[in-house]
Amino acid sequence: MVDLTLRQLRFLAETARTGTLARAADSLHLTGPAIAQQLKALERGVGMTLLERGPRGQELTEAGRILTRAWECIAAELEAAEEELDELRHARAGTVHVGVVSTAKYFAPQVIAAFLRDHPEVRVQLSIGNRGEVLELVEGFHVDLAVMGRPPERVDVEKAEFGDHPYVVIAPPDHPSAGRPGISRKELAAEPFLAREPGSGTRQLLHEIFDGLEGAPRVEMVIASNETIKQAVMAGLGLALISAHTVAAEVHDGRLVVLDVKGLPVRRHWMLVRMARRAVSPATRAMWDFVLSEAGRLLPDLTAGTAEGPA
């Protein structure tokens, strides 16, 4: 059986269906001798007779029926596989593994949901982590694409911007500077700040904003979670520089306020990133294109103005 071919099984089934080698050859656009040669090779391979002459022409023996049933199962599986491949070719199916930095988790589910409404047969697997964790997923080829603020510098990636990423200073609603226009950075330098861990993008940006002011910023507490930072600011433990997209709900509900600081918001950009050497499936390309064209309008809208800060 090791040398059995799908072509031979197809010839056997077609001969049994039509009743003669001549009709099978005509149906398959081949010659009778060509089919006869393949059927003899098939019989030698299995060691049994597969066809015998009956009242209605060539009929299957018991061994022939076993192989024909096998061909019918194989043909059905191949047809199903072809349908699945066609779905993949046209991005109607497949799985896309997406990595998202924790700051982007406030809008990424809405973007994915919108994509899946257009591509209901595509499956999405989502991994969320800090920047370092997501970079490991990207560089290790564990995700097809990733959403982050700063792409990696030491590896070859395909990258594209898809929306503004503003950073703001937040305070509790009862803070003395709440609602006051044109607050200077020098005034804020005297305030206690709650900040992410050293090396994080937000922490780096905080120092860039206060660059040139002696002793600033005054980081009173290091907190590794944006959620905890928000709760700490609400409790009055200090101010925080944070992505505007992480506080839209709390500002809308009046639990936090955005201070009107000169030069803020700092506007960076959300980036879509993938390893340049990684093969791109049609489903992945469909999601990439969708994010670039549609995700910008799905970002939380918290701040107005176009003030530019340190890039």
Image: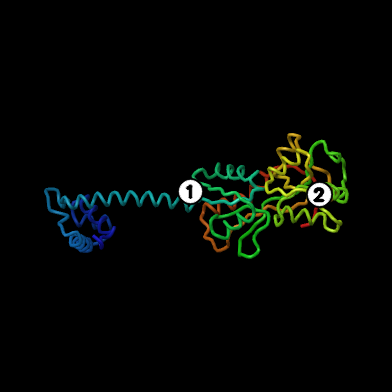
Decide which of 54, 215 is in the foreground and name it.
215
On the image, the x and y values in percent for residue 66 come to 21, 50
Q: For residue 166, say whether it is visible.
A: no
Task: Report whether 48 appears left or right of 28.
Answer: left
Task: Report whether 193 appears left or right of 116.
Answer: right
Decide which of 192, 273 is in the foreground and name it.
192
Task: Report whether 204 appears left or right of 38.
Answer: right
Q: For residue 190, say whether it is visible.
A: yes
On the image, the x and y values in percent for residue 128 come to 60, 49
Q: Which residue is mark 1?
A: 93
Decide which of 208, 24 is in the foreground and name it.
208
Q: Which residue is painted at 55% across and 41% down in the image?
A: 117
Which quadrant of the view contains residue 174? top right
Image disc number at residue 264 = 2
Three-letter amino acid code of the residue under disc 2: Leu
Q: Quadrant of the N terminus?
A: bottom left
Q: Residues within 10 Å of mark 2 (few under 14, many from 20)?
A: many
Q: Quadrant of the C terminus?
A: bottom right
The secondary element bearing badge 1 is classed as loop
Q: Residue furthest top?
A: 253
Confirm or deny contact between disc 2 and disc 1 (CB under 8 A). no
Decide which of 249, 43 is in the foreground and name it.
249
Image disc number at residue 178 = none
Q: Residue furthest front?
A: 220
